[in-house]
Image (cartoon, helix red, strand yellow):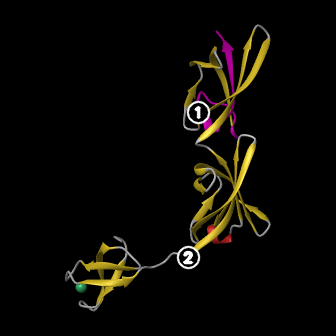
């Protein structure tokens, strides 16, 4: 607890303390006089939120606990721990508070968080050759980066990336899979 001062019974004032042992009562040592004494651990109150996580065309609904004061924002990363799915790295896509959709809110005011899984995503690809286009989806880690001009292979088809469309904000020359709506490639 570096940025927090605690009352030291020996010094008779708030001083800096180092944590000696964590537990229901934390044992702390005063940095001024080295007295070790217990303090009641401050328990953060937790908010229970419903999380609906989209992965490709399926979605998973579960409940998560977050400290009440946590500020949640659309676009922010959120770890969702689900019994069935395990820990999912997601990105917040929408927040619902009292029937309204908000861009940001404190955890205690949020009833439902809509998020999309970004640890594994389905990359949509259109590959064209001689006037024909083939579309496919391939599962890739969300953090995998792709670049226009790069030669890659999907389902046995080798192609050069010619264009990529991003979620929300047009086109890019380089992007991570989680931010790509679709890739276009020319078959080699
Ligand atoms: Zn002290």
Q: Does the segment drawn in magenta span residue 46?
A: no
Rendered residue at 27%/92% (across/down): 12
Among the 4 quarters of the image, the one containing residue 154: top right
Q: Is residue 95 left or right of residue 68?
A: right
Q: CA distance from mark 2 to mark 1?
A: 38 Å
Mark 1 crowd level (few <14, some 14–19, many ≥20, 10 Å Cα) = some
The residue lying at 58 percent from left, 56 percent from top is 81
**Lower position in the chain sequence, tag 2 or tag 1:** 2
Residue 7 percent coordinates (x, y): 33, 86
Residue at the spot 61% in from the left edge and 49% down from the top edge: 90
Up-down relation of residue 85 to residue 19 (above or below): above
Coordinates of residue 77 in the picture (x, y in percent)? 58, 52
- Residue found 60% across the figure and 39% down from its top: 120
Element at label 1: strand
Q: Is residue 184 left or right of residue 35?
A: right
For label 1, the residue is 175
The residue segment tinted magenta is 167-188
Kindly check if marks 2 and 1 are in contact, taking CB atoms under 8 A apart as contact: no
**Residue 147 vertical position relative to residue 111 in the rendered view, above or below:** above
- Residue placed most toward the observer, 146 or 25: 25
Mark drawn on residue 39:
none
Image quarter of the N terminus: bottom left
Hey, which quadrant is residue 163 in on the image? Answer: top right
Residue beneath disc 2: 45
């Amino acid at each position: 607890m570096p940025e927090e001062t605690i009352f030291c019974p020996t010094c008779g004032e708030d001083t800096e303390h180092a944590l000696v042992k964590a537990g229901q009562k934390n044992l702390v040592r005063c940095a001024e006089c080295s007295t070790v004494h217990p303090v009641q651990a401050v328990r953060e109150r937790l908010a229970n939120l419903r999380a609906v996580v989209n992965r490709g065309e399926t979605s998973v609904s579960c409940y998560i606990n977050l400290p009440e004061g946590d500020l949640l924002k659309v676009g922010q990363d959120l770890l969702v721990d689900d019994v069935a799915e395990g820990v999912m790295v997601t990105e917040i896509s929408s927040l619902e508070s009292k029937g309204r959709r908000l861009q940001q809110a404190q955890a205690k005011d949020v009833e439902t968080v809509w998020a999309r899984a970004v640890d594994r995503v389905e990359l949509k690809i259109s590959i064209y050759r001689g006037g024909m286009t083939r579309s496919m989806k391939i599962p890739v880690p969300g953090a995998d980066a792709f670049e226009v001009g790069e030669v890659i292979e999907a389902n046995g088809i080798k192609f050069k990336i010619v264009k990529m469309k991003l979620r929300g904000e047009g086109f890019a020359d380089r992007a991570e899979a989680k931010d790509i709506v679709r890739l276009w490639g020319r078959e080699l």
